[in-house]
Image: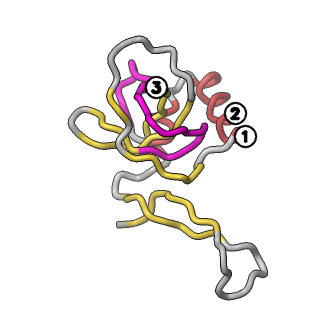
Amino acid sequence: MRIDVLPLRKVPSSISLLSYEVEEPVVYGQLIEVPFRRKKIFGIVWNTSSSYEGVVQPVTTVWSSIILNSIQRSILEAIQTTHGLIGAGLLAAHLPADRVLKSLSVVETGAKPFPTEPQTFQWYGNR
């Protein structure tokens, strides 16, 4: 399956989305790792049915974490349209370069001190 990916790093202004091939099923907003210019970078699945016809590389890693929901996408698209910005640049501006991917656990307010099933997400944290 061919997908479009919004990279989580600053890219040239001529690039808005990247296309890749993925074997396993993915959903919109899912965190993935892809090859880009001899490096591996993180990205978000933006579209699960890409219309790009050229040669594409395979996705390196797929995480189960959904880190961008439909409301966040709508806000990002509105900012892109009104200010003429690219989504990758917008996200990169809010993700400092000295951050690395870490696992975060989210626990409901008022839960026991050690919940049996906290929600775990992948996101950027301090080195």
Question: Would residue 40 appear left or right of 70 to someone viewing this image?
Answer: left
Mark 1 residue type: Ile
| In the image, residue 50 above or below residue 24 | above
**Horizontal placement of 11 versus 80: left or right?**
left
- Residue depicted at x 44% and y 35%: 23
Determine whether label 2 and label 1 are within 8 Å by CB: yes
Q: Secondary structure at mark 3?
A: loop
Tell me which amino acid carries mark 3.
Leu
Name the residue furthest top: 53
Q: Nearer the viewer, mark 2 or mark 3?
A: 3
Q: Identify the residue shown where x is 50% and y is 46%.
A: 31
Image spot of residue 123 (x, y percent): 49, 57
Mark 2 or 3 closer to N-term?
Answer: 3
Nearest the camera: 22 or 11? 22
Kindly report the secondary structure that dominates the magenta region of the rendered protein: loop
Mark 3 sits on what residue? 17
Name above or below for residue 50 compared with residue 36.
Answer: above
Q: Residue at x 35, y 26 (%)?
A: 12
Q: Of the numbered discs in the image, which one, if any, rests on residue 71?
A: 1
Residue at the far bottom: name it: 113
Q: What label does residue 74 carry, if any?
A: 2
Q: Quadrant of residue 34?
A: top left
* Residue closest to the far front: 23
Q: Start and end of the magenta stretch?
A: 10-32
Cα distance, mark 3 to mark 1?
Answer: 19 Å
Q: Position of residue 116 (x, y in %)?
A: 66, 80
Seen from the viewer's position, the closer of residues 66 and 76 is 66
User: In the rendered image, which quarter contains the C terminus?
Assistant: bottom left
SS at mark 2?
helix
The label number, if any, that marks residue 47 in the structure image: none
